[in-house]
Image (cartoon, helix red, strand yellow):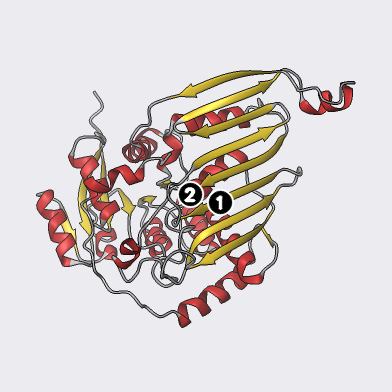
Amino acid sequence: MDNRKIRLGIIGMGNMGSGHLSYVLNGECPRVEVTAVADINPEKLKRACDRAPGVKGFDEGMKLLDSGLIDAVLIAVPHYDHPRFAIEAFKRGIHVLTEKPAGVYARQVREMNEAAEKSGVKFAIMFNQRTNPVYARAREIVSSGQLGELKRLVWIVTNWYRTQAYYNSGSWRATWNGEGGGVLLNQAPHNLDLWQWIFGMPKRVRAFCSVGKYHTIGVEDDVTIYGEYENGASATFISTTGEAPGTNRLEISGDLGKIVLEEGKLKWWKLKEPEREICFNCMDGFAQPECEYSEFRASEPDGHPLIINNFADAILDGEELIAPGSEGLNSLSISNAAYLSTWNDDWTQIPVDEEAFEKHLAKLCASEEVIRKNVLKSEPAEKLKERWQVRW
């Protein structure tokens, strides 16, 4: 019996970090032992240490990295600090699993990826929705060529509804200085990751990010992104926190049919012949291509412990990572390009102009006024668990 375990440290004991600690304490990650935790908030740190007797607590993340008590670290701090702690961990030969998004701007994430490659340690990102069998099946169909030449992706994901009370619950929420953005940086990173994971990266985007359209906030809460691809395919992505009831519907079309993901189900219309051949060979101007229809449905696992377990298996046995940390740059590049497109009122190429993006972000951060106060306490991680699943 293999009793090997990794010694894991967790930096950040807020909703996400404390939730990950729970997975380990509940026995859902058998090859992981939490040996150290860190948080700059004394109350959160004490609460974590009380829950896990014997685990060493640190009032700052760097102290945890220097402790010698860990083989790997899980980073669950505000977005701007993901790359900072990751790079310091790489310098010390410590494996890294970071929460999403990878960071706030492309340069810091690119530098993080470069540091990871030099270090030779394992680097993963918490894109837990990749473990959902429905999304994994969609990727398999697309990547295997069973949809033929790709034509179009349309994703309407508007069921991220949030009230003003949510944004009032922390002065850092929905701010350029605190989170680095709104719905694109907080709610939608999983969707942006799945977009590129399944359909690939666009070459350029034209985006419209509406600031405070439905809430009293200074960042975007409504977004429409249009992307173009080298082969002529297109993508449309729509998301908001200001619509109810919302929709989560992903449709992908190709030369050999289409798939639709909605309500936990994948529906597949598979053409018997390529549409392009039918278009130019059929003599009936109103003919409809024949197709076969099938459905795929599978229960959704709790992806967070699956990602943690995969991370441990990669360290101990060399297993392939489900969500390599380097791929965090892809979804962030889309959101960075969407912001820059909105700010410039023009198309933006990918890779994004890093200098132009950072200059504009710096101006927003410098001029930002914090107009909210803390009026709510964070909910226990157990109550937030359902929010971390796919919201159909």
Whole-percent x, y for residue 252 in the image: 62, 36
What residue do we see at 45% from left, 24% from top? 297
C-alpha span from label 1 to label 2: 7 Å
Q: Which residue is mark 2?
A: 158
Whole-percent x, y for residue 356 in the image: 62, 72
Whole-percent x, y for residue 139 in the image: 56, 33
Query: Position of 333 compared to 276: left or right?
Result: left
Total numbered labels placed on residues in the image: 2
Q: Which of the two discs, 1 and 2, labels the residue nearer the N terminus?
A: 2
One can see residue 321 in this view: no
Q: Which residue is mark 1?
A: 238
Are the residues tagged 1 and 2 within 8 Å (C-beta)?
yes
Image quadrant where one finds the C terminus: top left
One can see residue 103 in this view: yes
Could you say whether the residue bearing mark 2 is in a helix, strand or loop?
loop
Tell me where residue 88 sits by quadrant: bottom left
- Circle 1 packing at 10 Å, graded few (<14), some (14-19), many (20+), is some
Say which amino acid is labelled 2: Thr
Say which amino acid is labelled 1: Ile
Query: Position of 180 compared to 384: left or right?
Result: right
